[in-house]
Image (spheres, coloured by chain):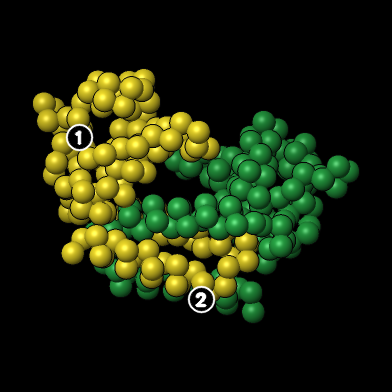
Chain colours: A yellow, B green
Amino acid sequence: MIIQIEPESDIPIYQQITNQIIVGIARGSIQQGESLPSVRTFAADLGINMHTVNKSYHQLEKKGMIRIVPKSGAVISSPQDFNESSLERLKDDYQLLIAESLVVGMSNEQIKELVSSIIMNFKKLNN
Amino acid sequence: MIIQIEPESDIPIYQQITNQIIVGIARGSIQQGESLPSVRTFAADLGINMHTVNKSYHQLEKKGMIRIVPKSGAVISSPQDFNESSLERLKDDYQLLIAESLVVGMSNEQIKELVSSIIMNFKKLNN
């Protein structure tokens, strides 16, 4: 698993870690059921504060992406670990993102094409 | 414009305001070019802290959804106010959301159907 921090980015570092872990799982470069490094190791490897890694792990746990298991640490969830409320939350997120897209002037077709092309990209990486 | 705050929600109040304003613009219940109420009025109407409204307005400004104009206050942006960087940010948001959807076990078809049905809903509201 390779996490690349962009210190100059507008996106806070804990959010960058969260995002890259989620995209990594979707791409198959991080396996479901696998354990993430301990907060201490992760922070040392990236040369960042343990607090920052902790914040990302908490965010991933809240989203249901990882479970904190005694002795195993932060374990990446599998699809069967998610429930209806994860799906409901995602629906709200899509509604908001599509609203934003319409506000900035994207057409319905542009939104659908963008979604299809991103899905296609993940598909390629998983084959 | 009707904003409904859910105090029991996991979503912070400033984020609820931001989200509802964005969805309101996409639905056409808030017009582009229109001014939002002053922070003071908005806070008094909702019975919340001015700081909370301020935080939401700042977030909307950062997303480019409103512009702070002297004397007119917070003016809702029009599509021509957005630039390439807004589109780039949205692409990143779609990538992350689609990654999350794949991780929770949604199929490509389910994602596309969800996106289509949300778009269809906004379309109905705008006709």
Disc 2 designates what residue?
A109
User: In the figure, residue B95 lies in which quadrant?
Assistant: bottom left
Amino acid at the residue labelled 1: Leu
Q: Chain of mark 1?
A: A
Q: Chain of mark 2?
A: A
Seen from this angle, which residue lies furthest right? B71
Give coordinates of residue B43: x percent, y percent: 71, 38
Q: Can residue B8 be seen at all in this image of the molecule? A: no
Q: Can residue A6 be seen at all in this image of the molecule? A: yes
Residue in front for this viewpoint, B64 or A84: B64
Tag shown at residue A36: 1
Give coordinates of residue B120: x percent, y percent: 50, 76
User: In the rendered view of the protein, which quadrant contains the N terminus of chain A?
Assistant: top left
Amino acid at the residue labelled 2: Glu
Left or right side of B12 for B61: right
The span from disc 2 to disc 1 (Cα, nearest Å) is 39 Å
Helix, strand or loop status at disc 2:
helix
Left or right side of A34 for B42: right
Residue occupying the point 77% across, 51% down:
B75
Residue occupying the point 78% across, 57% down:
B34
Q: Residues within 10 Å of mark 2 (few under 14, many from 20)?
A: few
